[in-house]
Amino acid sequence: MASKLATCFVYRNLNQSHPNTVVRFPSSLSHGLLLPASCKMRQRSLSSQHKKQHIKKASHEQPSTDGDPQPGQDRDSEHREPSLDSLPNAVNINGAEQAEQLSGGQLVDMLGMIQNTEKNILLLNQARIHALQDLEKILAEKEALQGEINVLETRLAETDARIEVATQEKIDVKHLEEQLEKLRSELAQSGNPEGGDTELHAHLNRFLNDEYPPSHNESIHSLTVELNSLREENASLKSAIESFKAQLNDVNNTSERVVVLEKERSSLESALKDLESKLLESQEDLSELSALRVECKDLREKVEDLQVMLDNATKQANQDITVLQQNQDLRRKLEKLEASLEEANNYKLSSDKLQKYNEEMQQKIKSLEERLQKSDEEINSYVQMYQDSAKEFQVTLSDLKEETKKRALDGPVEDMPWEFWSRLLLMIDGWSLEKKISVDDANLLREKVWKRDRRIRDTYMACEEQSENEAISAFLKLTSSATSQGLRVIHIAAEMAPVAKVGGLGDVVCGLGKALQRKGHLVEIILPKYDCMDYDRICDLRALDVVIESYFDGQLFKNKIWVGTVEGLPVYFIEPHHPHKLFWRGTYYGEHDDFKRFSYFSRAALEFLLRAGKKPDIIHCHDWQTAFVAPLYWEMYAPKGLDSARMCFTCHNFEYQGIAAASELESCGLHAHQLNRPDRMQDNSAHDKVNAVKGAVVFSNIVTTVSPTYAQEVRTAEGGHGLHSTLSSHSKKFIGILNGIDTDAWDPATDPCLEVQYNANDLQGKAENKAALRRKLGLSSADHRRPLVGCITRLVPQKGVHLIRHAIYRTLGLGGQFVLLGSSPVHHIQKEFEGIAEQFQNHDQVRLILKYDESLAHAIYAASDMFIIPSIFEPCGLTQMISMRYGAIPIVRKTGGLNDSVFDVDDDTIPPRFQNGFTFLDANEQDFNGALERAFNLYMNNPERWKQLVQKDMNIDFSWDSSAAQYEQLYSSAVARARARNLLN
Ligand SMILES: Nc1ncnc2c1ncn2[C@@H]1O[C@H](COP(=O)(O)OP(=O)(O)O)[C@@H](O)[C@H]1O
């Protein structure tokens, strides 16, 4: 279109033939003709002059002989007749005459020019024709457009007219409505419309017929109908909205009620959990105390007898005191009577009656005096007796105390319970932190405690009755010399069984700590003070009169330090005074700010060690939550003087690594720009993130994981969760040590959670526990030989949840019973298992209990014949060891620690004495079925061999002793290396 218009513009100018207009031709026609018209004309006149001169000149000069062709010259043109118009003026004036004067060559030139000019004129004519044709086309298009515009204008006029009519109609309707209203009111005034006001009716009819022609009436009617329907629709919409609103309100109310009920339910559950754990604890205490009870029985009986006597005497004394008071009242009355008698005598009453009365009164007074005397004597004898028995009680009590003290002092110092030493240690730490003794004295005293020095024990016994100041000075006398071969080990962890346990980590911290303590090392634990801990399992919990300030997010926060003993180990609990209530969340993990919570705790723990002046040989931290301790120690606290320690880091599961944006590291004071490097803490996959576990691997002197096979697996790309390269480059300090179990806590011969205690030589108790669990869970007891398959686990993908689910159905298919105890932090897995639990809630052979329940776990281990652990990967696993100790044969996938502790009964390559369970290789249903079916076969068809297997498993030593010895070895050589280096320096 634009090119068309441009062409059109050019041609129009061409038609006007303005002398200065640029004449632009279509490219095909423009050869050599793009000249302004004036130029052309000038050129033309110039060329005529030139030609004139040329002609004049030619008359004097010789004609050219070379005859080179001029541009545009054509041989044919020689024969063409030049048109008269196209000839130059000079040539036209007197052609015949001048032609005679022109030479032949000049004529040919002239003719060529004329021909060229003719050609140009032809081309110009052609262009003009084209231009005219285009103009025609444009005009036709213009006409068509005009036609369209006309049509549109007509339509517009019609629409305007219609709008006018409609407006007029609207005005008419309004006018009519007014008239109608007027008529109606007239009609109403006339009183009886049917009564025959004929004139008015006629008027009305006329009006209606004249003013409301039928078409109008119809349109008004249809409008009214439409309006009504719209109104109805509107009303119904309104009512629908109202009802929706009401429903919405109901829904809101219901969800509020659901939230309230949910809260009630969770508070009831936690109360129930508390009660259960208290019950459990009291049961355990009962068994622990039973030995002490026997010893104290005699003492208690004596004390009780004395107490009874004392009670009786007190009761009697109380009664006597009442009688004494009564007697005093009587005496007062008597005195009054005597006074009145005297008065009467004064008045010299002489009547007989009065005399008689007097005599009677005298007698009464006498008998009262006698009674009074008697009761006084009785009371005195009781008081005497009471005083005697109280004296006797005091004597016996002090005798007993003396005897106990003497027995304790005489007994071997090793017999003192761990509880005693830990309490002593915490007392010394308290004095040191409260600045009552110097840090050096505290260290010396601590060493004595840790060596279980007899003198410190005796001093403590001797000072029991004394004031704190006297005790402190007695203790300070002991600080003469002290050396020790044992190590000072401090564990910093997020869990410790049984007070704060989520999984195996808690068991390890407690079990390893106790085993190292037994080996003569000074072991201390630092934990966060969670609100949801089992406080009943902490002995002598108290807050120290000291506040430790630690840095976080650019400021200092106060921390309260609590001390107490757990399973005989001294534990420090750090309670941060932080506005985000870091450990006051009703849960251990899974909070959105876990990275912050635990990096805070790691820093506060080191701050506490520094302020307390501790000089540990080993600081042992566990998992990502306390992995920050290693870089913090070497980057910050060793330079501050807390430099006696070697750092040990144990990773219990490489799946959890504590990964966060590098900037988050700054909160605890570590410098992101220094540590977000490939050889420091930078995550191996995301380079803008830091990895706490990687940091601990890099910054620790010893790095361990919880089984040798897992240590191999995590060094491969498949098993390393991204850290395989880091572990490989630090392989010299990396080792796998198989965990042990706490054989005191997990002992079927003493377990207070069991219905009946039993051991490998008496398996009747195991059968009774099976029957008891069936009763408790409402499972069928019809066939006591039906095998019971147990499973206790966190329900997370790592544990092979698809195989656990499959195992339920396969066990049923094989004729067994299945019990699962577990819960899941993964919402969809929890939901899925809740569905299965519901499906089997009244089933005779299957029960799923989806919660954490320590005592039920004990009961299930004892009741189970088989125990499944189909893990995809398993760093160590404790449940296979616990189940074996309770005589439940493990069926496990060969991975990690399971591969290091369970050996297949049908594997000929394994010496028979080590064969203890059933294993399978691949995490699929077929392989699992194979192992489960082999176990069922043996159980059903060879009960004697099964029994031998149960007895063998129960006798395997899974205690911490050998594992703790390996840790001891690692610690000692790290410390020795450090000392040697210090000597060299
Ligand atoms: N629902 C539960 N109730 C009670 N104890 C449980 C429950 N789930 C797991 N446990 C206990 O937690 C510990 C699991 O340790 P482990 O086998 O190392 O697995 P992980 O540490 O990966 O959870 C065992 O002591 C086991 O008895």
Image (spheres, rainbow, N blue to C red):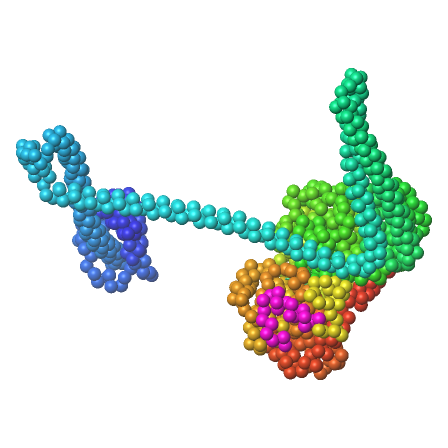
From the top left corner, tell me how far across and down residue 327 is, in percent. Answer: 79, 33
From the top left corner, tell me how far across and down residue 778 is, in percent. Answer: 58, 67
Q: Nearer the viewer, residue 214 or 180?
A: 180
Relative to residue 688, is residue 838 depicted above or below?
Answer: below
Q: Is residue 595 left or right of residue 415?
A: left
Figure disc tally: 0
Ligand 1, by image quadrant, is: bottom right
Q: In the displayed orientation, state which residue is furthest to the top.
A: 347
Q: Tell me which residue sits at (84%, 37%) in the image.
A: 374
Q: Nearer the viewer, residue 305 or 966?
A: 305
From the top left corner, tell me how far across and down residue 417 is, in percent. Answer: 84, 57
What is the quadrant of the C terminus in the image?
bottom right
Q: Tell me which residue sits at (81%, 44%) in the image.
A: 313
Asked if residue 641 shows in the view, the reply is no
Asked if residue 227 shows in the view, the reply is yes
Q: Is residue 102 left or right of residue 755?
A: left
From the top left corner, tell me how far across and down residue 34 is, in percent. Answer: 31, 51
Is residue 236 on the magenta stretch? Answer: no
Q: Nearer the viewer, residue 652 or 442?
A: 442
* SS assignment for the magenta stretch, majority: helix
Q: Tell me which residue sits at (54%, 62%) in the image.
A: 834
Magenta region: 765-785
Q: Place residue 929 in its image quadrant.
A: bottom right
Q: Nearer the viewer, residue 599 or 41?
A: 599
Q: Tell me which residue sits at (34%, 47%) in the image.
A: 240
Q: Place residue 245 in its image quadrant.
A: top left
Is residue 777 on the magenta stretch? Answer: yes
